[in-house]
Image (cartoon, coloured by chain):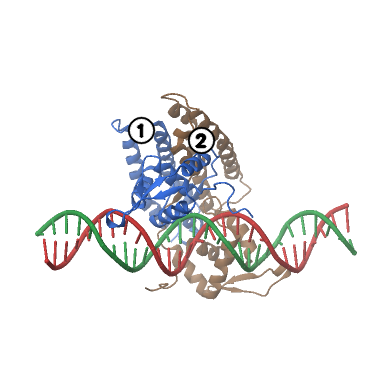
Chain colours: A blue, B brown, C red, D green
Amino acid sequence: MERQAVSELNPTAASLLGFLHAGALSGYDLVGVAQLFIGDFWTLTRSQVYRELKALAERGLVEAGEAGPRARRPYRLTEAGRSAFAEWVAQPPGTEQIRYPLLLTISFGSWLGPKRLLELVAEHRGLHEERLRSYLALDADATVEHEPYQRATLAFGIHYERAVLAWMDELPGILTRSGPGA
Amino acid sequence: MERQAVSELNPTAASLLGFLHAGALSGYDLVGVAQLFIGDFWTLTRSQVYRELKALAERGLVEAGEAGPRARRPYRLTEAGRSAFAEWVAQPPGTEQIRYPLLLTISFGSWLGPKRLLELVAEHRGLHEERLRSYLALDADATVEHEPYQRATLAFGIHYERAVLAWMDELPGILTRSGPGA
DNA sequence: AAGGCCATGTAACAAGTTACATGATTAA
DNA sequence: TTAATCATGTAACTTGTTACATGGCCTT
């Protein structure tokens, strides 16, 4: 059954190893860093991070240092961790996953009717506008030295948010044919 | 603590109830229907479906009929299930979740360099082209009577795939400044 | 020096995935 | 009529989420 070929890593764990290249960090810090750098397209929570750190420590890919104030425990990358990460990052990434509850609701839109649906969409629209604005600001901000890789992921966000907004803009036309609902 | 207010439903379970409005279906059938109608923006697996059906049956929201051939057990919506669904569908949907491993890899792109990254992107590109093609075909196909709600979700897919492709097209420009890698 | 807030972590539960099991059909 | 295939489901494990616990830090 081979529980673990050589060093199978899930993407979340691998990302943690990636961030630890910059120096030892506590679980709490890692959550912050991860949310900042990959949070827009890779959700993770604190509990996950702590669990992964514990598992990584058991596998010898990280080492916990002595606890500081507030039980803060810094984790340091080991050599094994370094090479496990290198192995992971070289692998072809899998396909994306999207879970969009608004689309579900629209799928079952016949229970609500176009009017109510468009209200719901309008509520979401603001969020997407705001995200786009913040992405564009980041993109324009020359003082933040983005390395090209961050620019690349940022560009994705910009394209994505624009697509969502464009889609929302054409929804009234799609939904209001064949009789108004509710 | 209130384990379950009146009829808390997760979106997956709610969708199953939604599909059961059209008549009794087995778990297997439900997987098929769901994959067809919402599979592009809401992943679900067989095991999940069976588990949810069992849970829904325990809560009286569906009823299992007698097993047919191959242990096929059809589930029928109850009145309670009907109203639980109605309640769910009326609620404002949550925000979307995206998990895109390719973006993760790009985030850690400094370990690979632009050349290798662009190869990875090229591999993914085909998939997105194909999805876009199939969406456009569906959209153009007038023989398939789409109700507007399906058109609406389809339109999302089209915008999304176009955005991904456009993003991929501008990646070489973003990544190849500041020295070629690998 | 007391009260409230915030950093840090854990535990319990829910949802998602992978691998396996079994019995009907179908085709050779 | 046996072997192959496929429909249907279950079990075991991994990942993700929510709620809670604790104790240092800051403010008054």
Foreground residue among B128 and B98: B98
Q: Residue at x 37, y 52 (%)?
A: A27
Foreground residue among B121 and B86: B121
The residue under label 2 is which amino acid type?
Leu
Disc 2 packing (10 Å; few <14; some 14–19; many ≥20): some
Return the x and y of residue B114 as percentages of the image width and height: 48, 29
The residue under label 1 is which amino acid type?
His
Determine the secondary structure under disc 1. loop
Q: Report in which chain the residue with disc 1 lies.
A: A
Quadrant of the rendered structure where residue B57 is?
A: bottom right
What mark, if any, has residue B165 been given in the picture? 2
Foreground residue among A109 and A86: A86
Q: Residue at x 59, y 48 (%)?
A: A5
Return the x and y of residue A117 as percentages of the image width and height: 43, 55
Quadrant in the picture for the N terminus of chain B: bottom left
Q: Report in which chain the residue with disc 2 lies.
A: B
What mark, if any, has residue A35 been given in the picture? none
Residue of label 1: A146
Foreground residue among A119 and A80: A80
